[in-house]
């Protein structure tokens, strides 16, 4: 298994403006109840503007090659957790299989529980973006997005959607749940892109 260590900090600082460290704690923040995943009927899909739509069962997913990514995590609610080790399938590996069409500039993530979020496709080509099933060597707990969550360390953690079930590739941006409810459309922690409005 390949291990990737990414410096997601800008310069020498590791903690973005307005953030505080939580140490060993890992807060669980969820809108609504935590979904229960039936792994016998679980599947993951990649569709929309792709040459080769993908669908994996849980057993098929676990046959895919995995990587470890060591990266920091920053939540829009102001906490940061450093040196997380994520294990999962690298997003760009899946892109090689699905082959997004040239006009696919964005994707929408959809999840158990009805949650969605939106991200530019370019983020999936970054070395540290992955679909994680483990955190620090342990399977992801349901409260933290298990059995699988998307991890995009460069963006606030609401973009690292929990309970991911698929992606849809799109020509135009399609704001997700939090983006429709006042959160910034992109979410760069180093630029404090927390909200889409000013106080």
Image (cartoon, rainbow, N blue to C red):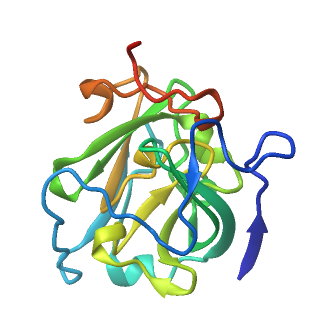
The part of the image, by quadrant, that contains residue 45 is: bottom left
Left or right: 116 as drawn, with respect to 71: left
Q: Is residue 39 left or right of residue 74?
A: left
Position of 13 compared to 124: left or right?
right
How many numbered marks appear? 0
> Quadrant location of residue 121?
top right
Position in image of residue 32 (x %, y %) = 14, 54
Work out which quarter of the rendered image holds the N terminus and state it: bottom right
Q: Residue at x 60, y 40 (%)?
A: 123
Q: Position of residue 128 (x, y in %)?
A: 67, 57
Please tell me which residue lies in front, 195 or 125.
195
The vertical placement of 114 against 177, above or below, is below
Specify the farthest residue to the right.
Answer: 12
Q: Nearer the viewer, residue 73 or 80?
A: 80
- Residue 186 higher or lower than 31, as above or below: above
- Front residue of this view, candidates 21 and 81: 21
- Residue 66, x across and y down, in percent: 61, 76
Q: Residue furthest top?
A: 198
- Residue 99, picture quadrant: top right
**Which residue is at 35% across, 39% downward?**
117
**Residue 141: horizontal and vertical position, in percent?**
34, 78
Residue sitting farthest toward the left: 33
For residue 49, side relative to residue 181 (left or right): right
Q: Residue at x 71, y 55 (%)?
A: 127
Q: With respect to residue 178, does 9 lie above or below?
A: below
Which quadrant is the C terminus positioned in?
top left
Residue sitting at 30 percent across and 59 percent down? Answer: 165
């Amino acid at each position: 298994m390949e291990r990737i260590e990414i410096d997601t900090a800008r310069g020498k600082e590791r903690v973005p403006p307005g953030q505080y460290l939580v140490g060993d704690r890992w807060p669980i923040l969820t809108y609504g109840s935590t979904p229960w995943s039936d792994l016998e009927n679980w599947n993951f899909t990649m569709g929309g503007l792709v040459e080769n739509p993908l669908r994996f069962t849980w057993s098929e997913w676990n046959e895919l090659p995995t990587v470890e990514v060591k990266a920091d995590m920053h939540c829009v609610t102001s906490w940061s957790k450093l040196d997380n080790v994520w294990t999962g399938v690298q997003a760009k590996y899946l892109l090689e299989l699905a082959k997004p069409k040239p006009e696919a500039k964005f994707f929408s993530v959809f999840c158990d529980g009805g949650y969605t979020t939106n991200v530019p496709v370019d983020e999936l080509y970054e070395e540290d973006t992955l679909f994680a099933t483990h955190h620090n060597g342990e399977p992801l707990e349901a409260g933290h997005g298990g059995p699988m969550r998307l991890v995009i360390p460069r963006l606030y953690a609401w973009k690292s959607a929990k309970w991911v079930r698929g992606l849809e590739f799109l020509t135009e941006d399609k704001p997700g749940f939090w983006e429709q409810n006042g959160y910034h459309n992109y979410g760069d922690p180093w630029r404090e892109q927390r909200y889409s409005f000013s106080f």
